[in-house]
Image (cartoon, rainbow, N blue to C red):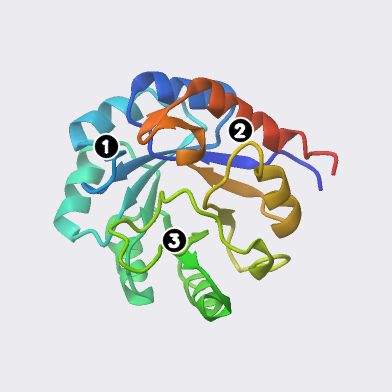
C-alpha cells in the first residue's frame, strides 16, 4: 500500500477548525446543511468558511434529501466542489442532481449487514464517489454522525467503479485497523475529531491525519 490516504474532515463550523484541517493536510473539508445536526451551518456561515479554503482542498456540502430550491441557493452562494447526498435519494435522484447542478455527487450508503451491499453497486454506477457509512439505528433522527462503526469485513477488498470513502465511528486509535481491514484509500471523520458534539479539536484533527499517514509503508 503506497501513497497518502485522503482524509475528509466533515462538519466544520468555525474558521479555526477549517484552518486546522487544511494545515493538517485534509484533502476534503465538509460542511453540513441539516438542521438536526449539531454541525449544521447556515449558507452565510458556509460561504465564509468555504472562502478560506485554498485551492486543491475539495469543499463538500452534506445535505439530506435536499430540494432543488435549496441546492440552487447553496450553489449560488457557497463555492462548493462536491455535493454529498446523505438521505434516501434514489439512483434517479442522484442522476437528476448531477445533471441539474453540474457538480460531482458523493452518495452516502449506510451499511449494517450484507443486505445493504447491493445499494453500493447500484449507486456506484451513477455517483462520482461513494461514502460507506454506518447505517443509523432504527428511530435515529440523523442519518450519520452517530460515532458508531460497522463490521468492516463487509466491505473488505470490495471495489466499485468510482472512488469510495470509509466513514463511521473512526478515531485516531482505530483508523489504522479500519484501513488495513477494508483497503480504503479515503477516510471521512467528524465526531472522531471533536471535543464535544459539533466542536472540532485542532489537536485531534492533526493526530487523526497523522495516524493515517503512518500506514504508507504497509
Q: Residue at x 57, y 61 (%)?
A: 150
The foreground one among 131 and 151 is 151
Q: Quadrant of residue 45?
A: top left
Label 1 close to label 3 by CB (< 8 Å): no
Closer to the eye: label 3 or 2: 2
Label 2 close to label 1 by CB (< 8 Å): no
Horizontal relation, residue 191 to residue 72: left or right: right
Q: What is the number of the mark on residue 108?
A: 3
| Quadrant (top left/top right/bottom left/bottom right) for the C terminus | top right
Residue 20 x, y percent position in the rendering: 49, 21
Q: CA distance from mark 3 to mark 2?
A: 22 Å
Residue 6 x, y percent position in the rendering: 61, 41
Q: CA distance from mark 1 to mark 3?
A: 21 Å
The foreground one among 194 and 106 is 194
Mark 3: few, some, or many residues within 10 Å (few <14, many ≥20)? many
All told, the count of numbered labels is 3
Say whether disc 3 or disc 2 marks the residue closer to the N-terminus. 3
Residue 206 x, y percent position in the rendering: 59, 25
Q: Is residue 9 visible?
A: no
Look at mark 2 in the image and give the residue it sits on: 208
Mark 1: few, some, or many residues within 10 Å (few <14, many ≥20)? some
Mark 2: few, some, or many residues within 10 Å (few <14, many ≥20)? many
Callout 3: helix, strand or loop?
A: strand
Q: What is the number of the mark on residue 59?
A: none
Callout 2: helix, strand or loop?
A: helix
Closer to the eye: label 2 or 1: 2
Q: Residue at x 27, y 33 (%)?
A: 46
In the rendered image, the vertical position of residue 127 relative to residue 8, given as above or below: below
Say whether disc 1 or disc 3 marks the residue closer to the N-terminus. 1
Residue 129 x, y percent position in the rendering: 51, 58
Look at mark 1 in the image and give the residue it sits on: 78
Q: Residue at x 61, y 48 (%)?
A: 186
Amino acid at each position: 500500500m503506497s501513497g497518502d490516504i485522503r482524509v475528509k474532515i466533515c462538519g466544520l463550523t468555525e474558521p479555526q477548525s477549517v484552518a486546522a484541517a487544511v494545515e493538517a493536510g485534509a484533502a476534503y473539508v465538509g460542511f453540513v446543511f441539516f438542521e438536526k445536526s449539531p454541525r449544521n451551518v447556515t449558507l452565510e456561515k458556509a460561504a465564509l468558511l468555504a472562502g478560506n479554503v485554498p485551492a486543491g482542498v475539495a469543499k463538500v456540502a452534506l445535505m439530506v434529501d435536499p430540494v432543488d430550491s435549496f441546492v440552487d441557493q447553496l450553489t449560488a452562494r457557497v463555492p462548493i466542489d462536491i455535493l454529498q447526498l446523505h438521505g434516501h435519494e434514489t439512483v434517479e435522484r442522484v442522476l437528476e442532481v448531477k445533471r441539474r447542478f453540474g457538480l460531482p455527487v458523493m452518495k452516502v450508503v449506510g451499511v449494517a449487514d450484507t443486505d445493504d451491499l447491493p445499494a453500493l453497486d447500484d449507486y456506484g454506477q451513477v455517483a462520482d464517489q461513494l461514502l460507506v457509512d454506518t447505517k443509523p439505528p432504527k428511530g435515529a433522527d440523523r442519518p450519520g454522525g452517530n460515532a458508531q462503526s460497522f463490521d468492516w469485513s463487509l466491505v473488505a477488498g470490495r471495489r466499485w467503479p468510482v472512488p469510495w470513502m470509509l466513514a463511521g465511528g473512526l478515531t485516531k486509535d482505530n483508523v489504522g485497523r479500519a484501513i488495513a481491514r477494508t483497503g480504503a484509500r479515503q477516510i471521512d471523520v467528524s465526531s472522531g475529531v471533536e471535543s464535544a458534539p459539533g466542536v472540532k479539536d485542532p489537536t485531534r484533527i492533526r493526530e487523526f491525519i497523522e495516524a493515517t499517514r503512518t500506514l504508507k509503508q504497509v
